[in-house]
Image: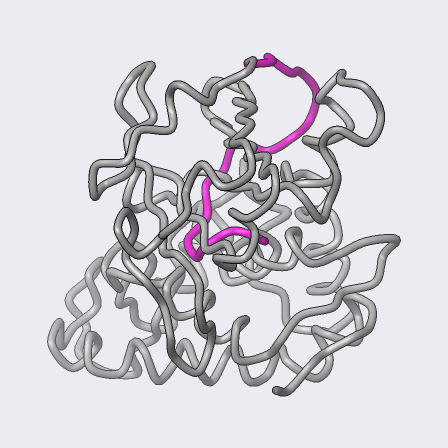
Amino acid sequence: MAQFEGTVKDFTKFIGPYARLKVAFLAAKYKKQIGKCENCGNRNSLDAAHIKGRSRSLLIANILSEFIEDDVIQIDLNEFEERFVNAHLPIESTIRVLCKQCHGEYDKGSKEESQVIEKRSVAEESATIEILIKDQMNKSKAIKLSSTTPGTFTSSNTIFSNIIGVHDGWWLEPHNDKFKNTLHMILNDGRTRRLYFFTIPANTITNPSLHFKQRNDRFRTNCSDIYIPLSGIKFGEKNGFDFTPFLVKEIPYEGSISAVPFNGASEQ
């Protein structure tokens, strides 16, 4: 597996250009399908512009926020690619087809989102991503807010998810071995600024394949693909398993944590 370890600036320098190319590849068919500027109708020099609130920098920050500790990022690059692609789908939710002039005006007009406008230099873009990462709720921040006996919720025994923006639910992919021991789960609803804490006793789920879709591919093996749609006060998984009985508490929080949802399964 191709592993990356380094700072946000390092990531932006080495992976940033690839991320731009990946967006161009993902948007190429969509640009051809639309065939004209969605603002003025110009059919020449078309760009793939990120929709406001769904900038490339923000999507990258949402992903990296789950893999950074003490300002150091550790992430498998294949997994980053998968999450980055998923964050752009469906493509019409993240991309507008604009001519170069309209693209420039569209970005300049985003005053309320000035910190997430697409930056050109490594220094500018990495600084933007660093700000956005600090604004995201993640597992380590949620554990600190748990207000439990120290050691109850730890990085190794806890799985965490923010809301997946397009799908309106939580997505987790724990390794099946985690169910053999007591497993804690934290779900963050950034819209209501509320954390939900669950405790699943050891061996409650003895055969995960009976309850959840399984993943065995180049990204993950022997993992459960868990998706919990938003449905009021209940936490039923899409295939029927109900996590509601394992809810131990919910905690509201305040502060500058962003409520912007992201795409791509959470850190495990």
Residue at horizontal 49%, vertical 75%? 81
- In the image, residue 209 lies at what x, y percent? 30, 56
- Quadrant of the image occupied by residue 233: top left
Residue at horizontal 31%, vertical 37%? 168
- In the image, residue 261 lies at what x, y percent? 46, 41
Q: Is residue 258 magenta?
A: yes
The span shown in magenta is: 250-268
Q: Is residue 140 magenta?
A: no
- In the image, residue 151 lies at what x, y percent? 82, 31
- Quadrant of the image occupied by residue 106: bottom left
32 on left or right of 226 = left
251 on left or right of 100 = right
Q: How is the image coloured?
A: one colour
| Dominant secondary-structure state across the stretch colored magenta | loop
How many marks can you see?
Answer: 0
218 on left or right of 188 = left
- Quadrant of the image occupied by residue 36: bottom left
Residue at horizontal 30%, vertical 51%? 212
Image quarter hosting the N terminus? bottom right
Residue at horizontal 38%, vertical 28%? 243
- In the image, residue 65 lies at what x, y percent? 66, 51
Q: Observer-nearest residue: 202 or 111? A: 202
139 on left or right of 231 = right
Q: Observer-nearest residue: 182 or 113? A: 182
